[in-house]
Image (tube, helix red, strand yellow):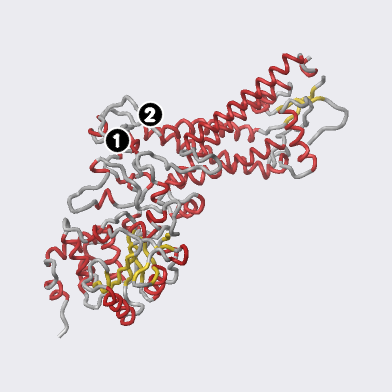
Amino acid sequence: MPITTSELVNNLSSSRRDFLKACTIAAAALGLSEAMIPRLVEAAANPQRPPVVWLHFQECTGCTESLVRGSHPDIARLILDIISLDYHETLMAAAGHQAEQQLQATLEKYPGKYLCVVEGGIPTKDNGIYCKIGGRTAMEILAEVAAKSAAVIAIGNCATYGGIQAADPNPTGAVGVWDLVHDVPVVNVAGCPPNPISFLGTVLHYLTFKRLPPTDKLGRPLFAYGRKIHDQCERRAHFDEGRYAEQFGDAGHLAGYCLYKVGCKGPATFSNCPAVRFNDVGVWPVGVGHGCIGCTEPGFWDTMTPFYERLPGIEIPGGRGIVTSADSAGKKILGIAGAAVGIHAVVGIGKRILKGKSDEDK
Amino acid sequence: MNYEKKYVWSVLFRLFHWAFVLSIVVLAVTGFYINDPWPNPWLAGSRGFPMADMRYYHFLAGYVFTAALLVRLFLYLFGNRHERILHALPVTPGKVKNIFTTMAYYGYVTDRHGEDLGHNTIAGIVYLFTYVAAAAQVVGGFYLLYPESAGWQAWGLKFFGTQQQARHMHHLLLWYFLFFALVHLYLVVWNDVKAPEGMISSIFNGYKFKPKHNGSAEG
């Protein structure tokens, strides 16, 4: 006798109540109506749901850690319940050859059916030798596993855009998944780490509607990355009213003023952090007094540092490597131009004094 | 020396010029505030909205700047002969030679200068570059203003990258316009002092004065 959805839901390791609660949270994050929740529950509890192969490349496992954190067991259990993980190096019991056999078994048993989740950047320099698992490079593994999958979910800034590995000078030539995988749909759940709800919403969207959620031009699902942090921020009124923390710990900071002047990257960053928040206790960086560091954006480490200044400290080529920001470059260029103008004027006046007035003026 | 009065800048060109000037002044001041707001005396609960106001005027001036740029583009194609795009670009041997005579003139090597009624060739090249920079500011500005619009996102990502990169370029180019304004102001005053051809007043009334010759008027 086939098991019903309700039986399955009742037999989950998380309680039925928690399961429904988490599905509701995900539905809210996806912007779905209440009426869709039963479909989400059904899809999540469907015994035919696709297995998941989770690949780890150049990463810190922070994305996995944040997903399975003990502070929000509902979400963590739900994720582990609704996705049937066939291969995940951190969580699986198998190791070594057993683990690799498991991976091969899934690829053979469910070609074109399983979901591939990628965590970590993929080094491409020198044929990708800087990241090897079981004797194969990350590039080889990704090429094989992604090609046979139904869809790829890149999780975290490393898997989406290369992350810290791709920071200048990018010694291993790290890139994100979508730079290498073109034949299979790829969705970028960006962030360092991304909110578990954004990942959960993406998975549930796929399970329920059999396709990946709509994305922006950077491949990020619109339900989670469609709006700028700055425009949803609880400190926005202070921004508009010109009230800023001038430095950490000053009166403005204590009064909860806007963190723009201490380097908040909210105005340049797309994410649902102000709305969905973290760790089930309603906190997020800006809420607790630290500016956004822009971790959901491509080129995060190069363009968002220094974290406590508003503009990136990019070296401007052509100089002697000393020019580190637009303002100092601008002031120097303007200074040189001013000096040139001054010298030009002095030469003209000097010449006139020496030679007397020219014909035209007589 | 006798001078004759010649009509050079059309009304639309002069309107473009002043709209461009005023919008750049407003954009630069508000732009610096937006980048690094100076501390203000308004306290919480008072009705000051300096950042909102500055952004409002920045966007307003941005639209004026965009309109001015479009007018200039129109004049490049359909303006009078001094205003058209090829007038001051090195497309003929004479225009190429003008680069060197202008350099010699500006370098105090000679007092003779090309009798270009419109722009000299160096100015023409610099202005063209300035309009390209202005177009970059417009595209970057709208990308920053409407980050969630798919259209601007496509353009912005293509030319600048992320919001943060676009903002960086937007800010760098602001310094170009300050540099341009400094050199431009200096050179028009310098030209006006050097030769009584009415260079400054021409942008108000449209007329320049050129030495009277028998026949050889330059175009």
Q: Which residue is at a point 77% across and 25% down the rendered structure image?
A: B111
- In the rendered image, the residue lying farthest to the right is B214
Q: Which residue is mark 1?
A: A238
Residue linked to disc 2: B38
- Amino acid residing under circle 2: Trp
Decide: is B3 above or below A297: above
Chain for mark 1?
A
User: Residue A174 at x, y = what percent?
Assistant: 42, 59
Q: Nearer the viewer, residue B63 or A325?
A: A325
Question: Mark 1: which secondary structure?
Answer: helix
In the rendered image, residue A180, in percent from the top left (x then y), is placed at: 44, 66
The quadrant holding residue B17 is top right
How many C-alpha atoms fall within 10 Å of the one at disc 2: few (<14), some, or many (≥20)?
A: some
- Crowding at label 1, few (<14), some or many (≥20) Cα neighbours within 10 Å? many
Quadrant position of the C terminus of chain A in the picture: top right
Residue at 56 percent of width and 34 percent of height = B20
The spot of residue B49 in percent (x, y) is 34, 31
Question: Of A271 and A339, which appears nearest the observer?
Answer: A339
Location of residue B198 with respect to B16 vertically, above or below: above
- Label 1 is placed on what type of residue? His
Q: Quadrant of the N terminus of chain A?
A: bottom left
Residue A351, horizontal then vertical, whole percent? 72, 18
Identify the residue at image location x=26%, y=63%.
A200
Q: Is residue A121 above or below residue B149?
A: below
State the separation of the CA atoms marked 2 and 1. 14 Å
